[in-house]
Image (cartoon, coloured by chain):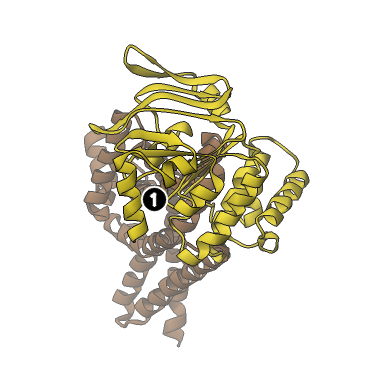
Chain colours: A yellow, B brown
Amino acid sequence: MAILEAKNVKKSFDGFRALKGIDFSVEKGDRVAVIGPSGSGKSTFLRCLNYLEKVDGGEIIIDGTRIVSEEKGKAVYIKEEEVRRATAKLGMVFQNFNLFPHLSVLENITIAPRCVLKREKAECEEQARELLNKVGLLSKAESYPGELSGGQQQRVAIARSLAMNPQILCFDEPTSALDPELTGEVLKVIKSLAEEDMTMVIVTHEMGFAREVAGKVVFMDDGEVVATGTPEEILLHPKEERIQAFLNKMLNI
Amino acid sequence: MDQFLEVLPPLWNGLGVTAQVFCWALVFSIPLGLIICSMRMSKIAPVRWFAQGYIVLFRGTPLMLQLIFFFYGMPIITGVSLDRNFAAILAFILNYAAYFGEIFRGGVQSIPRGQYEAAQVLGLSRSQCFFKIVLPQVVKRVIPPVGNEVVTLVKDTALVYAIALSDLLREAQIIMMKQNNLNAFIAAGLFYLIMTSLLTFIFHKIEKKLDYYKI
């Protein structure tokens, strides 16, 4: 059974139709890469799943909870509280990290478990150190985000998301804001999560990475899902012209 | 030297009045500024309009005019006359609250949307997000402009001479007329300098203290 499902999701910004009816589903243990040209709606879709944007129509079902459904052509959300309880099962890693600059690395990771889950400080810190160890930044526990490189900040952001034990981790172009030489360290961490069977949805421009990590690739263009399939089907032997054109452009850079 | 020393007791009294206006104005204008700021950013349009009107009015007219209005104008319009000190302090509070309100709004609006989004996806409630994520960053950002306003406030207190309050500057002026030299003015200038330097020093310390993180 799908742990995350979207049906016919629609979203417009001032008349611009960013999402024209997206169908999408994620099973437990899936690693889905969402690829496509800039402006195709990939990030918008991910933000809709995380309730950072409200959809205009369609359905989103997270682990059995239908957070939004369509009635008479309008999107109807369930109570905010319940939406938040459902979306808490999703973690989100942003393109720009969005670490809290006034908190140390350790505090960035422990703030949500402490404030939201009301867990003991010592327990949260122990967990945070384990997570930092996992992303290779244990020595930076007392540093502030401003003292870290972009790659390090993104690894902290991943640890911060993991601290809330999400069932699905979403990545919104996690390496797009990084210098090329720093993308490797972040991709390595995501790969290690993949090896632990973490369920993930990754919006990315890194084609090689998508091929390596993803079990399923979704290609989006112009607010629509053009094709869904295995990395081989989509990235190596694409049938659709739009995908071929996109891949050619990516390879010619 | 004798002449110089004899200016001190009256100046000292004037300094007391200046300090009184300064302290009351500061203590009340900052919380009022917070209220103005939250009203200005309210989702309810009439509340927002009220705050906008308030800011236009108090930031758009001279402080001296407001002082004169509260002391000389109030009795004519409402029939209630205010105590000289009270009228002065009231005008300062209302005027500075408009400025502080706008400084705080600038601070809140300078916090990137990503901070709110990160707090939301981590499950923090709106109030947790405000008090634990937004407010600490706003405080850091508004310290320099608030320090600027506070130093300006020290000097602006001299405007109370318009309603004949015996502050530092007015006392100095009276002595100058008597002694026919600049001693009292120089001494008063030194007093202002000491106060503003002290405040600058304090704000510098606070900035340093909050400098443990960049941005």
Give above or below for B154 relative to A131: below
Rendered image quadrant of residue A35: top left
Residue, far bottom: B1
Q: Secondary structure at mark 1?
A: helix
* A203 and B26: which is toward the camera: A203
Residue B103 in the image: state x and y as whole percent.
37, 52
* A234 and B145: which is toward the camera: A234
* A35 and B120: which is toward the camera: A35
- Horizontally, residue A144 falls left or right of residue B130, namely right
Q: Which residue is mark 1?
A: B85
* Residue B79 shows up from this direction: no
Chain letter behind tag 1:
B
* Residue A188 shows up from this direction: yes
Residue B98 in the image: state x and y as whole percent.
33, 47
- Horizontally, residue B102 falls left or right of residue A145, namely left
Rendered image quadrant of residue A57: top left
> Which quadrant does the N terminus of chain B fall into?
bottom left
